[in-house]
């Protein structure tokens, strides 16, 4: 019995951060705003400090 499925259609890109499910298909700046207390301005600042490309989706 294999633990890896050959199908990729049912795979979900969800990251669990600070007790919040973050969608991995969104752009990183907007995905971080799902965390309580994190707005667009703060997530933009965090991404720039961490040298993260804002135009990428990390899925």
Image: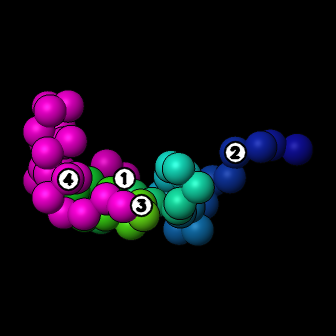
Q: Marks 3 and 1, how far apart in space?
A: 18 Å
The magenta segment: 37-59
Q: Secondary structure at mark 3?
A: loop
| Nearer-N-terminus badge (3/1) | 3
**Label 2 crowd (10 A; few <14 / some 14-19 / many >=20):** few
At label 1, counting other C-alpha atoms closer than 10 Å, the crowd grade (few under 14, some 14-19, many 20 or more) is: few
Secondary-structure class at tag 1: loop
Label 2: element kind: loop
Residue at position x 77%, y 43% in the image: 3
- Residue bearing mark 1: 59
- The residue tagged 3 is 35
Quadrant in the picture for residue 28 = bottom left
Mark 3 and mark 1 residues within 8 Å of each other at the beta carbon: no
Which residue is located at x 88 percent, y 44 percent?
A: 1
The mark nearer the N terminus, 2 or 4, is 2
Q: How many marks?
A: 4
Q: Nearer the viewer, residue 38 or 52?
A: 38
Taking depth in this image into account, of 53 and 47 the one nearest to the observer is 47
Q: Residue 8's x, y, as percent?
A: 54, 60
Magenta stretch encompasses residue 53: yes
- From the top left corner, tell me how far across and down residue 30 is, in percent: 25, 64
Q: Which of disc 2 and disc 1 is earlier in sequence?
A: 2
Mark 3 or mark 2, earlier in chain: 2
Whether label 1 touches label 2, CB < 8 Å: no
Sequence-wise, the earlier of marks 3 and 4 is 3
Marks 1/2: CA distance? 18 Å
Q: Which residue is mark 4?
A: 42
Residue found at the very far front of the displayed protein: 37
Q: Name the residue that disc number 2 marks.
A: 4
Marks 3/4: CA distance? Answer: 11 Å
């Amino acid at each position: 019995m294999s633990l890896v499925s050959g199908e990729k259609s049912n795979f979900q890109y969800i990251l669990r951060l600070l007790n919040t499910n973050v969608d991995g298909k969104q752009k990183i700046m907007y995905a971080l705003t799902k965390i309580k207390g994190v707005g667009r301005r703060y997530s933009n600042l965090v991404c720039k400090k961490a040298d993260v490309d804002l135009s990428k989706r990390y899925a």
